[in-house]
């Protein structure tokens, strides 16, 4: 049997470059080398494409912050892509998880693992994702949207009207509509980069300033005192939900360091929630996945209010962390789908389309 030519892309130009290197190397290490002829493509932070030339059987999983050394610049990216039977873009964040690379692969008519252009771009934009979830009547946190392209901020209301606002007015509106604490995020964030919690006006102003460095669109959300739980979805025509896992963050909230650097952060599978709540989450995960027209995979993240048990959808990640200790593969492992088998299934799904 001929091997399937599989291009694995990792690294990339987003703030999640380092995470993608860990995810990508985990995927390469665990792929069945009898089945796949792997062509690893590393994209540097400044967007240059390289062939990662290390002997495939010797590829080890990178530590966070490590960069691949055995690399050779690819002279013609399109040619290399076209030589592959399928591409696995293990890229997180902008230019990877947002529909851009998916668009390129569509144009070249190359099958690829994961969500298509529309689902990828909706989920990368937290503001637009919220609108879709609203339409599907899925419970989520109350929020306010700002645009920061001007010196003053622009408030974007429920009907998408734009109104200039001074910082003071924004703070007042946040206090009236949401109340502290709030979470301030760039609409296109990932891995918590640019996300901050604000407990008062001073922190709010600072958090808006920080978020606006990453994106013009800013989302301000009511803070939920909840358990953070996540559900893995797999499939296209009949997407299935895994059991539910919980994040036990080492820090006050699950920021970049607690995600990737603080060994005290733990995951708990199954989550510490009752059966009924778990079923609600699994159902909502599939519903949300369908609402954005997801295909193949996504990790759907929720908060469960500690007092009321109410379930709030937080976000969908269309290319979730894929290290061997990441929640997405771990949730499936808990459902008896081993990491290598999960990769096979994702590739099969993509080839079937
Ligand atoms: N509304 C909220 N209430 C409570 N915690 C939140 C809220 N929004 C975000 N957080 C915290 O911030 C983290 C990062 O926010 P998130 O929206 O998931 O962004 P990212 O896409 O960067 O992961 C979450 O994992 C959670 O710990
Ligand atoms: Mg998140």
Image (spheres, rainbow, N blue to C red):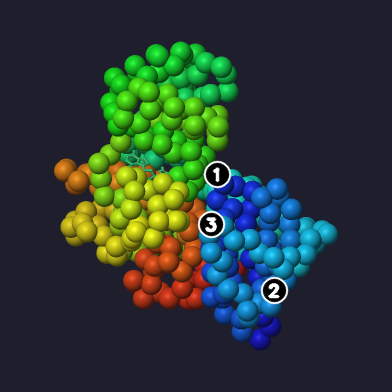
Q: Residue at left 48%, top 38%? A: 194
Q: Nearer the viewer, mark 1 or mark 2?
A: 2
Relative height, residue 181 to residue 320 (above, below): above
Residue found at the very far bottom of the displayed protein:
1
Of the numbered discs in the image, which one, if any, rests on residue 19? 3
Please provide percent x and percent y for residue 217: 51, 30
Of the numbered discs in the image, which one, if any, rests on residue 121? 1
- Pointer 1 or 3: first along the chain: 3
- Pointer 3 or 2: first along the chain: 3
- Pointer 1 or 2: first along the chain: 2
**Callout 2: SS:** loop
Q: Residue at left 29%, top 19%? A: 176
What crowding class fits label 1: few (fewer than 14 Cα within 10 Å), some (14-19), or many (20 or more)? many
- Residue 170: name its quadrant: top left
Foreground residue among 75 and 285: 75
Of the numbered discs in the image, which one, if any, rests on residue 54? 2
Q: Residue at left 63%, top 79%? A: 58
- Alpha carbon separation for disc pair 1 and 3: 20 Å
- Alpha carbon separation for disc pair 3 and 2: 19 Å
């Amino acid at each position: 049997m001929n091997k399937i030519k599989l291009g694995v892309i990792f690294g990339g130009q987003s703030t999640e470059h380092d995470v993608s290197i860990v995810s990508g190397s985990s995927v390469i290490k665990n792929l069945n080398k009898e089945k796949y002829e792997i062509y690893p493509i590393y994209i540097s932070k400044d967007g240059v494409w390289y062939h990662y030339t290390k002997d495939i059987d010797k590829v080890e999983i990178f530590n966070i912050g490590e960069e691949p050394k055995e690399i050779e610049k690819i002279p013609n990216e399109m040619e290399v892509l076209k030589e592959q039977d399928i591409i696995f873009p293990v890229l997180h964040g902008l230019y990877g998880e947002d529909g851009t690379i998916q668009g390129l692969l569509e144009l070249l008519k190359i099958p690829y693992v994961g969500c298509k252009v529309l689902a990828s771009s909706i989920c990368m934009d937290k503001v637009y994702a919220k609108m879709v979830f609203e339409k599907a009547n899925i419970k989520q946190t109350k929020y306010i949207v700002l645009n920061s392209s001007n010196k003053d901020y622009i408030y974007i209301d429920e009907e998408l009207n734009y109104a200039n606002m001074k910082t003071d007015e924004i703070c007042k509106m946040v206090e009236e509509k949401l109340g502290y604490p709030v979470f301030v995020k760039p609409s296109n964030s990932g891995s918590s980069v640019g996300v901050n919690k604000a407990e008062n006006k001073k922190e709010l102003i600072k958090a808006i300033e920080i978020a606006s460095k990453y994106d013009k669109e800013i989302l301000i959300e009511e803070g939920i005192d909840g358990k953070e739980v996540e559900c893995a979805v797999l499939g296209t025509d009949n997407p299935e939900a895994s059991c539910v896992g919980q994040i036990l963050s080492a820090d006050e909230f699950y920021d970049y360091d607690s995600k990737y650097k603080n060994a005290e952060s733990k995951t708990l599978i199954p989550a510490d929630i009752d059966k009924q709540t778990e079923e609600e989450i699994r159902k909502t995960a599939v519903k949300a996945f369908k609402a954005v027209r997801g295909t193949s995979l996504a990790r759907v993240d929720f908060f469960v209010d500690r007092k009321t048990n109410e379930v709030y959808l937080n976000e969908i990640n269309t290319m979730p962390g894929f290290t061997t200790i990441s929640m997405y593969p771990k949730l499936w492992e808990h459902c008896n789908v081993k990491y290598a088998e999960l990769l096979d299934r994702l590739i099969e799904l993509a080839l079937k389309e």
